[in-house]
Amino acid sequence: MAEGFKLDQKHGKGRVRVSRVWRKVAGAGGGDVIVEWSVSVSLASDCHPAYTADDNSAIVATDTMKNTVYAKAKECSEVVSMESFAVLLARHFTAFYPQVTAATVNIVEKPWERVVVDGQPHSHGFKLGSEKHTTEVTVSKLGALSITSGVQELALLKTTKSGFEGFVRDRYTLLPETRERMVATEVTAFWRYPFEHVSDIPAKPFCFTERYEGVKKVLVDTFFGPPDVGVYSPSVQNTLFLMAKAVLNRFLDIASIQLRMPNLHFLPVNLSSKENPDMVKFADDVYMPIAEPHGTIEATLSRTMSKM
C-alpha cells in the first residue's frame, strides 16, 4: 500500500538488439549459425519506495538489464533457441536479485536464412527472410513458468479455391456471394507450451526452434492443401479453425494456439467508358489489391483444461 493506494508497477528495457554467431557448428554442416534478436525485459520487483519516497536503492537499472542481455549471449557457447535464451535471462533476474518477484522476456527474431549457392548451403552466407519468430517467457521467483511462442507476418495467398456464401444479408449488404475468389492473409500465431514450472522443461534439451519450424509448416500446408488440387476454403474462419486444429493434433506438447488472419482483399477490376465499354472486363484475371480496410478474423483453440 502507498498512502492508502494500491500500487502495481514494473519496469524494464525494451528493444535491446543483440546478434550472436556460433562458428563452424557441426549440426549446421560445419557452417556458421547466426541469430539476431530484439529483446525486451520487464521486471516485477519490490521497489515501491522509488515511486513513493525518492528511494532508488531497490531498482535494477534498465542499463544493467541491457548489459545482462549481451553478457548472457556471450555465455551461450553452444547454439541456443531464443525460448531457451529467454528462460535463461528470466531465471537470472529472479535468482540474482532478491527484490525481483517475476521476470518477463519478449524476443522477436530477425529472419536470417542460410543462402544456397549452386545447390549447396553456404557456410557463412545469409539472406533476410520474411516472417518473424517470437516468444514471451515469464518466470516467477518460485519457478512458475509460462512460455508462448509465435510467428508474425506469415503472408499467404491462393489464387483460387476460395469462396464466401450464405452470410447475413440486410439493407447494408453489397458484397456478392461467390465460390471463386482469391484469398490472402498475413498470419499471426501464438502457441502456448504446457510447461508450468522451470522443472517441467525436459532434461534433454527441448528443441523450440524445431517446433517453430514444424508449426509453421503445418499452418502453411493446411492453408494450401495438396499441391496438385489444393483445398477449398468456404471462409477464412473455417480455414483458420482447420489450421489451428491441425497444429494441436500434430503437436501434443502445445496446449493452445491463437490465430489472427486479416482478410486482405483482391477486388475484381471492371473498367468501362462510353467510348470503350469493355476497357477491362473481369475474367478472373485483373485485380486491385486492397490493404485496408480489411476483414479481421481471430480465434483461440485450446485443449480441454488448457489456459490461454
Image (spheres, grey):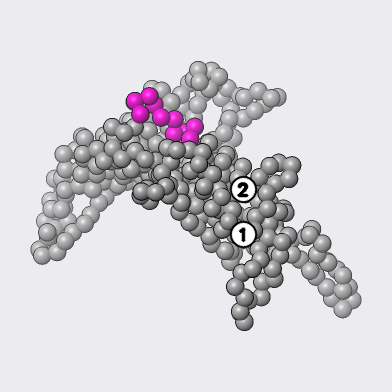
Residue 152 badge = none
Q: Is residue 114 above or below residue 293?
A: above
Against 303, is 81 above or below? above
Which corner quadrant of the image does residue 85 belong to?
Answer: top left
Instruction: Please name the residue shown 43% across and 41% down the image.
Output: 254
Q: Residue at x 46, y 27 (%)?
A: 21
- Circle 2 residue: 223
Q: Which mark is residue 235?
A: 1
Residue interval drawn in magenta:
202-212
Secondary structure, mark 2, is helix
Is residue 132 at least partly visible in the picture? no
Amino acid type, residue under disc 1 in the picture = Ser
Relative to residue 274, is residue 244 drawn left or right? left
Q: Is residue 122 above or below residue 139?
A: above
Crowding at label 2, few (<14), some or many (≥20) Cα neighbours within 10 Å?
many
Label located before the other in sequence (1 or 2): 2
Image quadrant containing the N terminus: bottom left
Residue 277 or 54: which is nearer the viewer?
Answer: 277
Which residue: 61% across, 59% down? Answer: 235
Whether residue 237 appears in magenta in the rendering, the answer is no
| Residue 77 shows up from this direction | yes
